Structures are given as structure tokens and as C-alpha cells.
Image (spheres, rainbow, N blue to C red):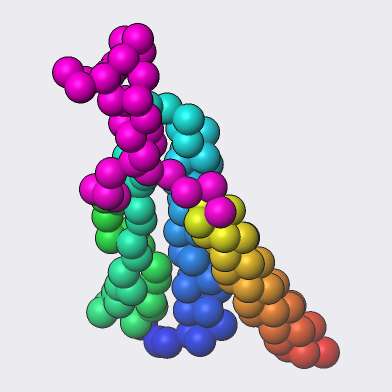
Amino acid sequence: MSFNPIKSAMHAASSGMNAQSFRMRVVSENLSNADTHGYQRKQISFKNELDRISGQNSVQIKNVTLDRSLGEQLYDPAHPLSDADGYVVMSNVDMMLELADAREAGRSYEANLSTFRQAAQMYSSLIGLLRR
């Protein structure tokens, strides 16, 4: 099997778009649960994976973990989730951090989309040259 750099670029870009799309879903879930008592923020990490047979690189989800930092503790002894001392643990989601993460995921997605479009345009141009 011969190495095709345009196909490889398109494969890497599409896997990057899939990874950033998943990242955006995790950020959305964090933002949705920002006011949920005791919710722990989810974090995502990626890995670069090389397919030795095709020689193509791709971005994969390495894992999704929970941020173990404690959320703010509010004194509310009447709350049904309060502990024995009357404190309720809030979520540890920082809205500004999540919004920054969402912006970064969006920009990364757009960069991968641009790469994919450029590679597709190269394919199209190559086919046009071969038809002459």
C-alpha cells in the first residue's frame, strides 16, 4: 500500500474534528451541570495514534476523568443535601474556564476543517489536471 499524503492529512483532520466535537460535548455537559450540587467537572485528554499499516496519524480520546477538586461549600442546613455540619458542596465547574475551553475547541475544530478543505481542494485540482 502506497503512502498518500493528501489522504493522510484528510484522515488526521477528520479525526481532529471528531475529537474536538467530543470535547465540546464534555464542555457542554459541564456547563449544564454548573449549578448541580456535588457535580464534578469532567476533563478530557487526547492521544496521537499512528496506524502502522497505513502510516496515518489520528487524534483519539485518551480518557475522560473527573476533576477531584472540591466545589464551594455553602452553609445551608435546611438543604436536603447538606452534611451533618449544614454545608452543601457545590459543583467545581468554573464557567470562565469552560467557556475558554469551548472557544479553544471551536477554534481547533475550525483549524482541522480548514486543513480538510485544503486537502480536498488539492484532490480536486489533481483530478482536474489528470483529466486534461
Frontmost residue, 38 versus 120: 38
User: Residue 96 at what x, y percent from top left?
Assistant: 56, 54
Quadrant in which the C terminus appears: bottom right
Frontmost residue, 52 versus 19: 19
Which residue is at 53% across, 79% downward?
9
User: Residue 50 at what x, y percent from top left?
Assistant: 30, 77
User: Residue 101 at what x, y percent from top left?
Assistant: 52, 59
Residue bounds of the magenta highlight: 67-96
Give the quadrant of residue 80.
top left
Quadrant in which the N terminus appears: bottom left
User: Residue 70 at what x, y percent from top left?
Assistant: 28, 44
Q: Is residue 90 above or below residue 43?
A: above
Which residue is at 36% across, 56% downward?
44
Which residue is at 38% across, 78% downward?
56
Query: Does residue 129 show up?
Result: yes
> Horizontally, is 76 left or right of 6 in the view?
left
Quick check: is 5 in the magenta stretch? no
Query: Does residue 102 show up?
Result: no
Q: Residue furthest left?
A: 84
Which residue is at 57% across, 60% downward?
100
| Count of number-bearing discs | 0
